Image (tube, helix red, strand yellow):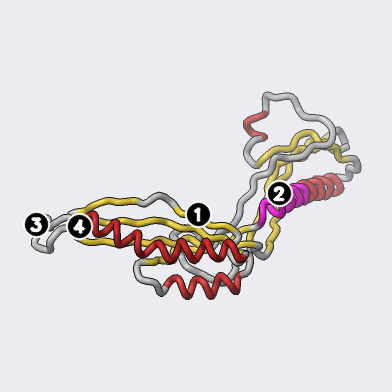
């Protein structure tokens, strides 16, 4: 049998327990007078800021941030259709990163009971070092899957030698038909995806969810 070109796809998925959690919360105030609303928001956010600073010092919080204050006004509608007097709002967002999820649970319960404080969502993460290592390993495993598939196809055709011709992210090979084929050992720039805790709208969940890292590649091999 003459040489045959085999095109395959390789995928791999890795699941890990999160190593850190980033809590997102908002301190908010509203009322009929702009100045009073801003002052109330500042008074409500001060103990939150002090608490996070103290936790950063004692090591129970890895890091925290506080965004700029947002102030805006809206004129609500009366059920009869007329506009009412303006209502002023002021808010500030905080994030706090925890390594100890038990500490996070106690803190979240405490902070959510404070006036004007809304706990938004928990973002489960890996450390940058772990994520980089897992992404490399996951990409390599996706390539191994592609090689195994190509080898199985070649064996079914009674062919023995499988050599790589091209490898790329999913969907890129079709756009690279006119480009010269790459030779020799190759490493793909794989497409990665991480499953977050909310999956869309923010939702509070203190149960750690697996971090999912995936890689998918397309490859072409020659078989003889």
Residue at the image position 34 percent from the left and 61 percent from the top: 28
Marks 2/4 in contact by CB < 8 Å: the verdict is no
SS of the residue under disc 3: loop
Residue nearest the observer in this picture, 58 or 159? 58
Mark 1 closeness class: few <14, some 14–19, many ≥20 residues within 10 Å? few
Residue 65, numbered label: 1
Disc nearer the start of the sequence (3/1): 1
Q: Is residue 31 left or right of residue 2?
A: left
163 w.r.t. 120: above or below = above
Mark 4 closeness class: few <14, some 14–19, many ≥20 residues within 10 Å? few
Distance from disc 1 to disc 2, alpha carbons, whole Å, reads 24 Å
Distance from disc 3 to disc 1, alpha carbons, whole Å, reads 41 Å
Residue at the image position 53 percent from the left and 75 percent from the top: 106
Read off the residue under disc 4: 33
Read off the residue under disc 2: 132
Disc nearer the start of the sequence (2/4): 4
Mark 4 or 3: the one toward you: 4
Read off the residue under disc 3: 82
- Quarter placement of the C terminus: top right
For the stretch drawn in magenta, the main secondary structure is helix
């Amino acid at each position: 049998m003459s040489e045959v070109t085999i095109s395959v796809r390789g995928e791999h998925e890795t699941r890990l327990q999160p190593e850190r959690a980033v809590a997102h919360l908002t301190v908010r105030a509203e009322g009929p007078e702009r100045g009073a609303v801003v002052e109330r928001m500042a008074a409500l956010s001060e103990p939150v800021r002090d608490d996070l600073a103290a936790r950063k010092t004692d090591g129970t919080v890895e890091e925290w941030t506080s965004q700029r204050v947002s102030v805006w006004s809206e004129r609500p509608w009366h059920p009869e259709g007329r506009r009412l007097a303006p209502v002023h709002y002021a808010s500030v967002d905080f994030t706090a990163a925890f390594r100890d999820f038990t500490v996070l649970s106690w803190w979240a319960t405490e902070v959510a009971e404070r006036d004007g404080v809304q706990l938004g969502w928990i973002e489960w993460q890996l450390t940058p070092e772990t994520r980089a290592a897992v992404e490399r390993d996951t990409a390599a495993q996706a390539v191994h899957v592609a090689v195994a598939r190509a080898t199985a196809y070649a064996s079914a055709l009674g062919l023995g030698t499988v050599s790589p011709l091209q490898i790329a992210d999913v969907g890129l090979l079709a756009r690279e038909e006119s480009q010269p084929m790459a030779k020799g050992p190759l490493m793909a720039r794989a497409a990665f995806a991480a499953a977050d805790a909310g999956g869309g709208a923010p939702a509070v969940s203190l149960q750690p969810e697996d971090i999912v890292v995936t890689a998918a590649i397309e490859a072409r091999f020659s078989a003889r």
